[in-house]
Amino acid sequence: MSVSSDRKRSGLVQSLACVALLAAGTTTALAEGTPRSISIELNGAEANGKACRLSFVVANGLEQSIDDMALELVLFDKEGRVDRFVVVRTAKVPAGKSRVRQFDIPETTCPSIARILVNDVKECAGAGLTPAACAESIQVASRSDIKFEN
């Protein structure tokens, strides 16, 4: 083998090593930059006696389990006025899993609720979780006639 071919081979190996490192760094950066979220979907609203039963699907896209989360919700009437504040708890939602939670809003008819706002995250328990971090991670959607916002 000549010195010239050794240099070419060495240069090729170094180039391939650099490309591999850059690719690995890009993959890591993309994984770290991928937004993790807590998705909360208002899935339905139905009468339950003198209450309106709200059904939510909570999907934990975080890397850690949510041991419990307390959400302050504000309910608005058809005229856009605040009707009431309620605090609901999600209970445990494991990482990468979804859970359905139902809450009865007493003395309320479902058609009287026009909009629900996630006003605040009062508590968010889990390894390394804070109410502020959970609040920033929340994404909402609605399959109901009721608007759901954060």
Image (tube, rainbow, N blue to C red):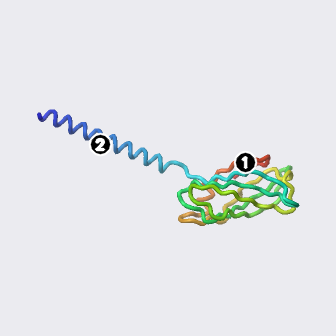
Badge 1 amino acid: Ser
Quadrant assignment, res 23: top left
Percent x, y for residue 106?
84, 63
Determine the secondary structure under disc 2: helix
- Crowdedness near tag 2: few (<14), some (14–19) or many (≥20) residues, C-alpha within 10 Å: few
Q: Which residue is mark 1?
A: 142
Q: Is residue 8 left or right of residue 100?
A: left
Q: What residue is drawn where x is 12% and y is 35%?
A: 3
Q: Amino acid at mark 2?
A: Ala
Asked if residue 148 is positioned above or below residue 88 in the image, the reply reads: above
- Residue marked by disc 2: 17
Of the two numbered discs 1 and 2 on the same chain, state the one appearing first in sequence: 2
Where residue 81 sits in the image (x, y, percent)?
83, 54
> Residue at the location (74% across, 55% down)?
55
Q: Quadrant of residue 123?
A: bottom right
Query: Residue 92: x, y in percent?
Result: 63, 64
Coordinates of residue 75 in the picture (x, y in percent): 79, 56
| Along the line of sight, the residue nearer the viewer: 122 or 126 | 126
At a point 57% along the width and 55% down the height, the residue shown is: 96
Give 52 or 22, whichever is nearer the viewer: 52
Compare residues 148 and 104 and report the one nearer the observer. Answer: 104
Quadrant in which the N terminus appears: top left
Left or right relative to 145: residue 37: left
* Residue 93 to residue 148: above or below: below
